[in-house]
Amino acid sequence: FFTDRLILGGYSDLALGSMSISGPLMWSVMSVFGAISAGTMAVVGRRVGAGRREEAGEVMGAVLVASGLLGLLVAAGGIPLRNDIAAVLAGGAEASQTIRDMAAIYMGIVFAIAPLKLVGDAGFTALQASGDTRSPMWISGACGGLNLVLSWLLVGGQLGAPELGIVGAAIGTA
């Protein structure tokens, strides 16, 4: 979300304002589910360390399914409620309707990818718990770079890309 705020800050005050609503909420929602990663790390890591790789695989399968289902619940709840969430977090009538609308658009796109995000996070944790810390590092670095490039291209329409504003930022994040 830092990348989006950085790029949107140079694009539009309204777009940056919308990130003040949607960014912290989306970060908080995804962080709450980070507890799954902590539990996964402990359980899978212990199984791998004890030489019980088959059990570790079974635990990981259950975690991936649970992460996907939780992601679907987040998407199913967040997408239809995004306008109400934006209205509540924006502080009511004082906030611009445009800012609330932009926040709702951003949240809709990011909520839609929640199942993939949570499954991916669980997969990264499983790799780390099994002793592979380099793959998640490289994948995370590549994803961060792709987020930066896509957001830069799509927010302001750089290098002939379409100018999508807040939608471009959300696509880059997704």
Image (cartoon, rainbow, N blue to C red):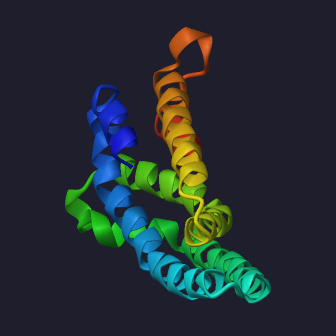
What is the count of numbered marks?
Answer: 0
The residue nearer to you, when weighing 34 against 128, is 128
Q: Is residue 33 above or below residue 166?
A: below
Please tell me which residue is depicted at 52% across the width and 78% down the height of the picture.
41
Q: Nearer the viewer, residue 173 or 157?
A: 173
Instruction: Please state which of residues 110 and 149 is positioned toward the viewer in this rendering.
Output: 149
Q: Nearer the viewer, residue 46 or 103?
A: 46
Left or right: 73 in relation to 9: right
Q: Where residue 59 sits in the image (x, y, percent)?
A: 71, 87
| Residue 55 at x, y percent in the picture | 75, 89
Q: Determine whether, in the image, residue 24 is placed left or right of residue 75.
A: left
The residue sitting at the left extreme is 94
Residue under the image location 71 percent in, 80 percent down: 60
Question: Does residue 161 sit above or below 47 in this rendering?
Answer: above
Quarter of the image where one finds residue 89: bottom left
Q: Is residue 167 visible?
A: no
Which image quadrant for residue 160? top right
Relative image position of residue 171 (x, y in whole percent): 58, 42
Direction from residue 97 to residue 142 in the image, left or right: right
Please identify the residue farthest to the top as the structure is shown. 159
Residue sitting at 38 percent across and 58 percent down?
22
Judge whether residue 128 can be spotted in this image: yes
* Quarter of the figure with residue 88: bottom left
Q: Quick check: 37 above or below 132?
A: below
Question: What residue appears at the point 51 percent right and 49 percent down from the top-left corner?
Answer: 137
